[in-house]
Image: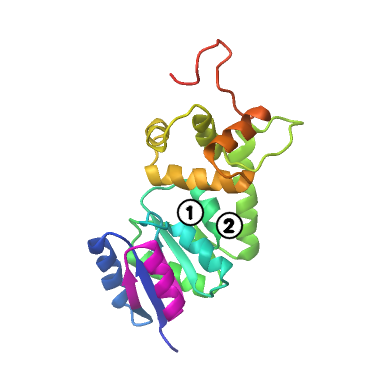
Amino acid sequence: MDPIRIVVVDDHPLFRQGVVDALSLEPGLRVIGQVGTGPEALELVRRELPDVAVLDVNLPELNGQQVTRQLTLEKVATRVILLTAYDDVEQVIHAIRAGAMAYCSKDVEPSTLVTVIEAVMQGNYYVGNRTYDKPGIERWLEEQTERAVRPYSEPGEPFHPLSGREMEVLESVTQGKSNKEIATDLGISHQTVKNHVTAILRKLGVDDRTQAAVYALKRGWVRLYKQDGSSGEE
């Protein structure tokens, strides 16, 4: 049986080389390339058409989610495994919807990563330390999406497409906060905020943050001021 052909993408050379070295020890795997940015990842995958791409979520220029989405749009058969330094269920939802087949913490054991690679090669998905088949991951997505939006959806209100975390980000956007301020307030990374803002614009079908804020305010999803008349900031 031919070995599974893999590319590894991470902007930290030491971590990237560690992943490459660990996978290279496995007789059934062969690492055929490694790069450090999103655009380089797209070029490498398009050229080599590996079986599996192991991508860091937080990549320069194009993040791992964006690379995954572009490969999905191009119908590239490479299976994508995303590695992350932070575990956020909304990010997992976006990752699977973008076309990723696995979402793992960067502190994953090498043996577990090998298991994940073998699982996605069999057409399965891996999230939350569990393996799912296609119907299973679809049920998981439905359950997690419903849970994420429940705090913002009152009975009888029209359903909106944003997750709970995205609504938090959108509320901060309406208050004029920068991505850096939002990241600090919510205790998440700057890149995670950027990912959420990108997803919000796409889901609402608007071009910029101002349009997104106006869209949400008109529909009463968020308010600029609290009921006591103070601003939304503490």
At x 65%, y 50%, the residue is 142
**Does the magenta-highlighted stretch encompass residue 76?**
no
Quadrant for the C terminus, please.
Answer: top left
Q: Is residue 130 visible?
A: no
Residue farthest to the top, as pictured: 228
At x 36%, y 51%, the residue is 85
Q: Earlier in the sequence, mark 2 or mark 1?
A: 2
At x 30%, y 77%, the residue is 24
Looking at the rendered image, the disc whose residue lies closer to the viewer, 2 or 1, is 2
Query: What residue sits right under mark 2 in the picture?
Result: 97
- Taking depth in this image into account, of 222 and 104 the one nearest to the observer is 222
Badge 2 vs badge 1, beta-carbon distance below 8 Å: no
Q: Position of residue 76 (x, y in %)?
A: 53, 74
Q: Position of residue 225 (x, y in %)?
A: 55, 18
**Does the magenta-highlighted stretch encompass residue 47?**
yes
Q: For numbered disc 2, what is the local secondary structure?
A: helix
Graded by Cα atoms within 10 Å as few (under 14), some (14 to 19) or many (20 or more), the crowding at tag 2 reads some
Residue range in magenta is 32-54
Q: Position of residue 70 (x, y in %)?
A: 52, 64
